[in-house]
Amino acid sequence: MKLDELLAKRADKNVYRSGDLCVKLFDAGYSKSDVLNEALNQARVEETGLNIPRIESVTKIDGKWAIVSDYIGGKTLARLMDENPAAEDEYLERFVSLQIKMHAKKCPLLTKLRDKMNRKISASGLDPTVRYELHHILDGMPKHDKLCHGDFNPGNIIVGADGDYIIDWSHATQGNAGADAARTYLLFVLDGKTALADKYLKLFCKKSDTAMQYVQKWLPIVAASQLNKQKPSERDFLLKWATVVDFE
C-alpha cells in the first residue's frame, strides 16, 4: 500500500492518505488490543448512521498495525476556526449541534463510560482519599447510555463536501453526555482556550437544556482520567481540578 501524503503526525501514530483511503499507521510498540478495539469502536459507531469514515480493513504495514478507512476530503473544524476567527460563533454552533446529534445515538456494545472512568480514577495516582471521593461522585451520577466520543474537539471534525464527519473513535463509550461535554470543556482549557471553553459550555448547556452545574460536576472525574496520559505539562493543573469536589 502506497502512503501518498502525511495528513497528521502524533506521538505514537501517523495518518496518511493512500488514494481514496486513509491509513492510520501505529508505532511498532503500540498495543495490538488497543488498535483492534479502536477499529471495533469505529465499526460499531458506523452502524448508528452518523457521518464517520467507514472501516475498510485492519492490516500490517512494514510490521506495524494500521487501520484503513475511507478518506474524507476537507479541512478540520479546528483549522477553519483558526483561519476564520470572525466566524468562531458560527463554527461553535455547528460543533455543539453535531455533538448533541451524536449524543442522541445509542451504541449498546461499546464500553460503558462509568466502568472506564472508574478504572482511570483507580489508576490516576491520586491520594486514596481523593480517589474514594471521586468514585463516590461517579457512583452518584445518573446512569445513561448515550453515545460519547471521549475526545470531541474541533480537530476531530472534518468539514467535507457532503457534510461534517467525526473521526478518531478510540475513546468511544456509552454513558452520560455530561461527562463527554466536560471532557470537551477540559480539552479547550488545556489547549489554552479558556474563553472558548466557557463559550462552548454555555452553548452546550443551552442547546441541550442541561444545567451547567451538572456538567461541572463531571470535571474532577474527567480531570482524574486525563492524569493517566502522564503529561508533565498538565499534571499540576489536573491535580488541582481533580482534588476539587465542588465547582462554583
Image (spheres, rainbow, N blue to C red):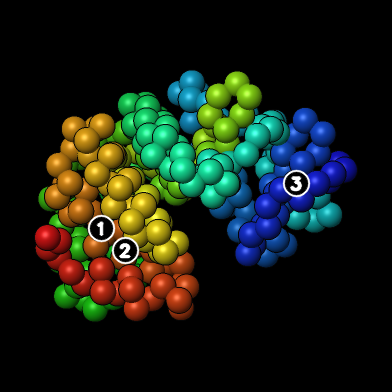
Q: Is residue 139 above or below residue 125?
A: above
One can see residue 69 in this view: yes
Q: Earlier in the sequence, mark 1 or mark 3?
A: 3
Asked whether, in this view, residue 195 is left or right of residue 51, the answer is left
Q: Nearer the viewer, residue 14 or 63?
A: 14
Among the 4 quarters of the image, the one containing residue 1: top right
Q: Which mark is residue 16?
A: 3
Q: Is residue 74 above or below residue 242?
A: above
Say which residue appears at 25% left-offset and 68% top-offset: 241
Secondary structure under tag 1 reads: helix
Q: Which mark is residue 150?
A: none
Q: Which residue is mark 1?
A: 219
Q: Position of residue 147 (x, y in %)?
A: 37, 34
Task: Determine crowd level at label 2: few under 14, some 14-19, many 20+ residues with C-alpha closer than 10 A.
Answer: many
Q: Nearer the viewer, residue 243 or 189?
A: 189
Q: CA distance from mark 1 to mark 3?
A: 34 Å
Q: CA distance from mark 3 to mark 2?
A: 31 Å
Q: Position of residue 82 (x, y in %)?
A: 54, 49
Q: Position of residue 158 (x, y in %)?
A: 58, 36
Q: Are marks 1 and 2 in contact (CB under 8 Å)?
A: yes
Q: The residue under label 2 is which amino acid type?
A: Ala
Among the 4 quarters of the image, the one containing residue 105: top left
Q: Earlier in the sequence, mark 3 or mark 2?
A: 3
One can see residue 57 in this view: no
Secondary structure under tag 2 reads: helix
Q: The residue under label 1 is which amino acid type?
A: Leu
Secondary structure under tag 3 reads: strand
Q: Which residue is mark 2?
A: 223
Asked whether, in this view, residue 182 is left or right of residue 81, the answer is left
